[in-house]
Amino acid sequence: MSLIVMKFGGTSVGNSERIRQAATIVKQHAQSGNDVVVVVSALSQVTDLILKVLNAARLGNASDVEEGLQQLSRRHEEVLPELFQGENLKGVSAAVEATLKRLREFCSALVLLGSATPQVMDMVLPLGEQMSARMFAACLDQIGVQASCVDSGQVLITDEEFGDASPDMECTRHHSREVLLPCLKQGRIPVVMGYSGATRTGLVTTLGRGGSDSSATILGAALDADEVWIWTDVDGVLTADPRICPDAVTLPEITFAEAIELSYYGAKVIHRKAIRPTMERGIPVWIKNSFKPELPGTKIVEALPASNHPVKAVTAVTQASLVTLTTRRDVHFAEIFGRLFLRLGHERIDVLFSTQSSSEDSLGLVLREQDTEHVVHAIQRLFRTELKHGVLNPVSVHRDIAVIAVLGSGMKGTCGILGRLFSVVARNNVSVIAVAQGASELNICFAVAASRVDDVLRAIHQEFLSPAGEGAQKQAAMQIH
């Protein structure tokens, strides 16, 4: 018998058929003798609709608020009659209506106030998960599996960083075991709301980007689960984006470190923040397709034996920019570097990679485009005196670039990867704007013009990863020699 935490994403519970399919998956594994804890996201599009309604309320646009609330109501009304009948339908419908009423009341207050603190927003944003968890538990009951809907605030305890909370693992371990393990002993499947938790004093918090995945991995770590399964709408982690590289294939296994790097550089299968709780406990995570549950998916593990394929995957951040800071005279650039990164860390800005000239007179930061203006203004404020007196030159920005990351733990100590990689780029007449490789040799990342990113991705995939044979044969030959 295994303890498995299963998380179902928004697309996996997007309509009545998918909810029923997900519930059937849970039933099959529970009947096979496993203890299963379920974590669910809101129905697809629901969280976006809630945000749309809240933004309209902030602006005082009552008609847009009403339209959004009607959309939310219809979104659930179209699912409920297809899932439930009779008293079950009445019970779940009443719970959904009560939740939507709370949202309506909050929006009425927000229209008057015009603003809300992150703490107040956290009370409302998880309402989609609250409705979907209630629906999922009722669906399990209907197909003969006893289930209980569990408020995440009872089991997942966090700090008070509203909007991007971090778990208090000691408290979460205590509360989750106190609530969820007795439920399992009674033969009931706990269905937990994803995305949110609560502080020690009971204030609702949300976990930020990748929050529902984080809910599953946090609970998996707290319960010492045997495995965590993330059910989504893709077959697992692929060697590349199949929309760009049609011959991309599913990777059977990757390491936690590889998964974190893939997530950081654009792969959207699981957020890097969600990987760490299970990584710290050595608990395997599976990425599986709820539409094709018979497929094996991808297993994320602590370590893997040496492989004949040093390169595992290629991915990209397609909207990026290069911000460059240069000096006019001798300065202690390490101090500039330190002050800047301290500020970026304080403001939670991710730097894709950085470069520094050997003469220590310039520093380049490769950033997501969405962060560029914020960082430029931060630099101008932080170094106002140095810029005014000419110690630093005005900040320059190179836009419309993309960052490509080539990843694989097997690249460490493997000769020839870098040479082959940039030979491929050169053969496609693409200039490299900036380049970096981490000390772990886990990835090589470089920036190119955004207009050429798809061409470069396809060429790299063909060189290193193509199942047609060229990439695989070359990698194997490198290992032999």
Image (cartoon, helix red, strand yellow):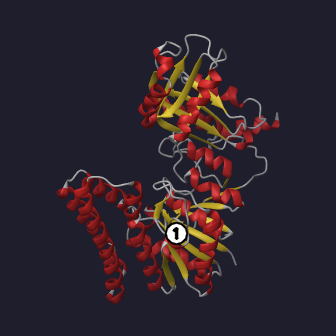
Using the rendered image of the protein, determine whether residue 237 is visible from the camera's viewpoint.
no
Q: Residue at x 41, y 76 (%)?
A: 135
Using the rendered image of the protein, determine whether residue 82 is visible from the camera's viewpoint.
yes
Q: Is residue 103 above or below residue 420?
A: below
In this figure, which residue is indicated by the disc labeled 1? 39
Which residue ends up furthest to the left in the rendered image? Answer: 63
- Looking at numbered disc 1 in the image, what kind of residue is underneath it? Val
Q: Tell me residue 327's x, y (percent).
A: 56, 15
Q: Is residue 335 above or below residue 135?
A: above
Q: Residue at x 54, y 28 (%)?
A: 365
Q: Residue at x 40, y 55 (%)?
A: 118
Q: Tell me residue 298's x, y (percent).
A: 62, 57
In depth, the one of 438 and 481 nearer the eye is 438
In depth, the one of 190 and 380 nearer the eye is 380
Q: Which secondary structure lies at badge 1? A: strand
Q: Tell me residue 220's x, y (percent).
A: 63, 67
Q: Is residue 430 above or below residue 213?
A: above
- Which quarter of the image is occupied by the C terminus? top right
Is residue 62 shown left or right of residue 364? left
Q: Residue at x 56, y 30 (%)?
A: 340
Q: Residues within 10 Å of mark 1 (few under 14, many from 20)?
A: many
Which residue ends up furthest to the top in the rendered image? Answer: 329
User: Which of the 4 quarters of the picture holds residue 479?
Assistant: top right
